[in-house]
């Protein structure tokens, strides 16, 4: 059967795992029996470039005269034979196919070294906590970055491993600069891309070519791909979708864009793509309907949304399908020794979504007016697990990255219970809000199901600004939640923000002190400071003056419109804090420099912090509320005990007792109860087992106990039950 649809992600996104958009759409098209093929041209270009043949071509490519190169590029060029000799082995190692090479790489006389290796002296301490494979991955990453530096200087200034010509896509209110670049001779990287695209298009011969553009760093290559197909295969219809058009191109009006694309679709892609297939691939003439689609009519850009069909429910869109993608050829790199960033770049993750949109949907810096956040729709836990099992079978990988805006705690609980019921062995991580629903027991349940890490927005660690952001959390609450995750063994990464409108210098300093204390207390393991960016579809962007920000212009561009240049009404230069915030965080993440004065991180005068030195420590000392709601669910993670009867005597009286011995993965423990209480407990633990489909409430357990015995509260708060609480009797 002729392939109707060809989906691509253009260069570049990630090296270690495919961006999931095309897999989502292909999974949906499967449910409609629409033939589709997909490719991640980013990894394919990288593999062609970083190969023996690729480097031979690279070093032979016309470049500036050697004497005009920087000493670093001169060195790399002089060592070209060493790079050509080692490249295939290094790539195979980073693909997980050549693990023994790690021993040779770590001896540090195998890889040619240029300027990127200069930072090694600063990172020597980090290798104490890294194994041989990790150290070798980091050294191999530096080696690739050296080659990348040579490419940037000598061949293509726009090159980058996870983005390409990103500058042309960022804040591109006008299409002029990008259009001008597209009229120039194709670059070296373009030619590599075209060679792959030519082979694919000629083999597949699609009728509809779909290009997913998630980020500004994919935009230039998307246009180049479309330009090549338009030139050599003008009969193929081309459409763009994805995160970039969804946020940036909502007010598109420049007709020149449609020299490259026939269609640009917005928001959820399933129904718009289905309608494009009907319009493009049908042999019989049909009335044409569109969903959220830009196209050109009479030389004018028009927006068509004339289909009355509703968007598909999340339960109807199918399981993401990763077939066609080169899953065994992605490369895992370790760029910097940041625990969470390492997860983004190292290892193959199956991507899934627990819920469409955001259940909170109030943060004032976020694009909450757009459908992908505004329209909240969770997916049932049993369906999620069905999809997980399908994807494990298809990809051979049991690692999952849930790419939610913020995963809902109740759904995370249901998902964890379903994973445990099915006895699935999986590893997963996701993005959350630090809300009080994440109790110590819920965190233990998530850990038991395979959750290894969460990331969440602490943003500006100041209660005034968190309220202004409408984050719905306080710093004290964040501290307690991060403690619960950390004590359960789940890594916590915090997104941090500076430069929010009206943020004072004092608040920036106090925010840093809060972050310092959180790391010193050991409840945060990873973090990253982002400077606030105003976007057009956020409450701050739409009502900037209300938030103390002044837009530099109200003009709406003809191309991209999302990032807004603005001035803070306070007049503070927030940029100058960037280096000090990031340098201090780098040290805090590695457990050092907590005793430094905050002033030491900045080369300009800052005020002293007004935060009490024990603010976080005091917050963590406050006990959680131990009053159990009658509706709380009680779950037992442990196994069946071995029961042994014995008699206990005191002052001439004798009682029948029961000793219950439990074995968990690490140790064994024994509790002692009265015979009747013990027999009831054994039966009840069987009912409460996580493997059972029904979950029981605290009220139901209490009622059951009181039909046989007396004084449930006395029993529940007794020493034996407290011991069970420590070993997996959870209150959820």
Image (cartoon, rainbow, N blue to C red):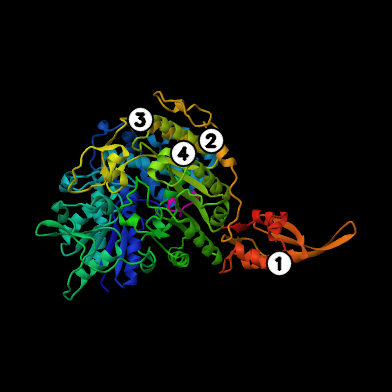
Mark 1 or mark 4, earlier in chain:
4
Q: Which numbered circle lies on residue 680?
A: 1
Q: Quadrant of the C terminus?
A: bottom right
Please indicate whether residue 553 sits to the left or right of residue 522 in the image. Answer: left
Q: Is residue 353 visible?
A: no
Q: CA distance from mark 3 to mark 4?
A: 40 Å
Name the mark nearer the viewer: 3 or 4.
3
Q: Main secondary structure of the magenta part?
A: loop
Q: CA distance from mark 2 to mark 3?
A: 27 Å
Q: Badges 1 and 3: C-beta atoms under 8 Å apart?
A: no
**Residue at disc 1, secondary structure:** helix
Please indicate whether residue 662 sits to the left or right of residue 175 in the image. Answer: right
Q: Quadrant of the N terminus?
A: bottom left
Q: Badges 2 and 3: C-beta atoms under 8 Å apart?
A: no
Q: Which numbered circle lies on residue 615?
A: 2
Give coordinates of residue 613: x percent, y percent: 54, 31
From the viewer's side, name the closer residue of 69 and 557: 557
Mark 2 or mark 3, earlier in chain:
3
For disc 3, the marked residue is: 576
Mark 3 or mark 4, earlier in chain:
4
């Amino acid at each position: 059967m002729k392939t109707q649809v060809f989906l691509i992600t253009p260069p570049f996104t990630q090296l270690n795992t495919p961006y999931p958009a095309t897999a989502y759409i292909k999974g949906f098209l499967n449910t409609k029996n629409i033939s589709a093929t997909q490719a991640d041209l980013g990894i394919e270009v990288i593999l062609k470039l970083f190969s023996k043949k690729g480097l031979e071509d690279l070093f032979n490519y016309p470049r500036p005269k050697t004497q005009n190169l920087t000493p670093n590029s001169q060195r790399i060029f002089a060592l070209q034979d060493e790079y050509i000799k080692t490249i295939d082995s290094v790539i195979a190692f980073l693909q997980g196919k050549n693990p023994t090479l790690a021993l040779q790489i770590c001896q540090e006389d195998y890889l040619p070294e240029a300027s990127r290796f200069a930072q090694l002296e600063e990172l020597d301490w980090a290798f104490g906590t890294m194994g041989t494979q990790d150290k070798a991955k980091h050294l191999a990453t530096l080696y690739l970055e050296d080659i990348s530096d040579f490419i940037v200087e000598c061949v293509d200034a726009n090159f980058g491993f996870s983005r390409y010509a990103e500058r042309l896509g960022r804040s591109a209110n006008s299409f002029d600069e990008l259009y001008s670049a597209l009229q120039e001779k194709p670059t070296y990287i373009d030619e590599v891309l075209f060679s792959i695209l030519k082979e694919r298009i000629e083999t597949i011969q699609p009728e509809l070519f779909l290009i997913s553009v998630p980020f500004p760093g994919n935009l230039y290559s998307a246009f180049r791909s479309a330009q090549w197909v338009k030139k050599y295969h003008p009969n193929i219809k081309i459409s763009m979708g994805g995160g970039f058009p969804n946020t940036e191109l909502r007010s598109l009006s420049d007709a020149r864009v449609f020299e490259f694309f026939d269609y640009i679709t917005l928001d959820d892609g399933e129904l718009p793509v289905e309608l494009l297939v009907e319009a493009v691939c049908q042999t019989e003439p049909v009335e044409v309907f569109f969903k959220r689609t830009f196209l050109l009519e009479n030389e004018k850009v028009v927006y068509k949304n004339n289909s009355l069909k509703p968007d598909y429910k999340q339960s109807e869109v199918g399981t993401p399908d990763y077939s066609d993608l080169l899953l065994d050829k992605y490369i895992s790199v370790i760029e910097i020794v940041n625990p969470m960033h390492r997860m983004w770049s190292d290892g193959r993750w199956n991507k899934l979504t627990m819920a469409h949109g955001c259940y909170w949907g109030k943060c004032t810096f976020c694009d909450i007016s757009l459908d992908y956040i505004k329209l909240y729709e969770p997916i049932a836990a049993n369906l999620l697990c069905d999809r997980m099992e399908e994807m494990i079978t298809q990809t051979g990988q049991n690692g999952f990255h849930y790419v939610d805006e913020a995963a809902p705690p109740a759904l995370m609980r249901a998902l964890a219970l379903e994973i445990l019921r099915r006895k699935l062995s999986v590893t997963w991580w996701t993005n959350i809000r630090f809300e009080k629903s994440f109790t110590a027991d819920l965190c233990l349940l998530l850990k038991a199901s395979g959750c290894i890490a969460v990331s969440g927005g602490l943003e500006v660690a100041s209660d005034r600004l968190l309220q202004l952001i409408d984050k719905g959390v306080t710093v004290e609450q964040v501290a307690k939640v991060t403690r619960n995750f950390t004590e359960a063994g789940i890594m916590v990464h915090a997104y941090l923000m500076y430069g929010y409108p009206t943020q004072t210098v004092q608040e920036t300093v106090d925010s840093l002190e809060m972050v310092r204390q959180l790391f010193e207390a050991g409840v945060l393991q990873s973090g990253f400071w982002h400077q606030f960016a105003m976007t057009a579809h956020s409450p701050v962007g739409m009502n900037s003056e209300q938030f103390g920000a002044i837009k530099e212009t109200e003009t709406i561009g003809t191309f991209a419109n999302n990032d807004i240049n603005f001035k803070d009404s306070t007049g503070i230069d927030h940029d100058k804090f960037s280096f000090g915030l990031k340098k201090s965080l780098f040290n805090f993440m590695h457990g050092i420099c907590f005793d430094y004065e905050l002033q030491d991180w900045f080369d300009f005068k800052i005020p002293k912090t007004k935060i009490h030195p024990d603010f976080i420590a005091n917050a963590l000392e406050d006990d959680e509320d131990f009053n159990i709601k009658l509706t709380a669910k009680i779950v037992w993670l442990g196994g069946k005990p071995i029961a042994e009867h014995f008699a206990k005597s005191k002052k001439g009286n004798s009682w029948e007792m029961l000793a219950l011995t439990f074995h968990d993965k690490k140790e064994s423990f024994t509790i002692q109860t009265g015979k009747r209480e013990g027999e009831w407990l054994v039966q009840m633990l069987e009912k409460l087992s996580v493997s059972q489909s029904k979950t029981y409430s605290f009220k139901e357990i209490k009622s059951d106990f009181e039909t046989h015995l007396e004084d449930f509260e006395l029993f529940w708060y007794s020493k034996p039950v407290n011991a069970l609480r420590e070993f997996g009797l959870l209150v959820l």
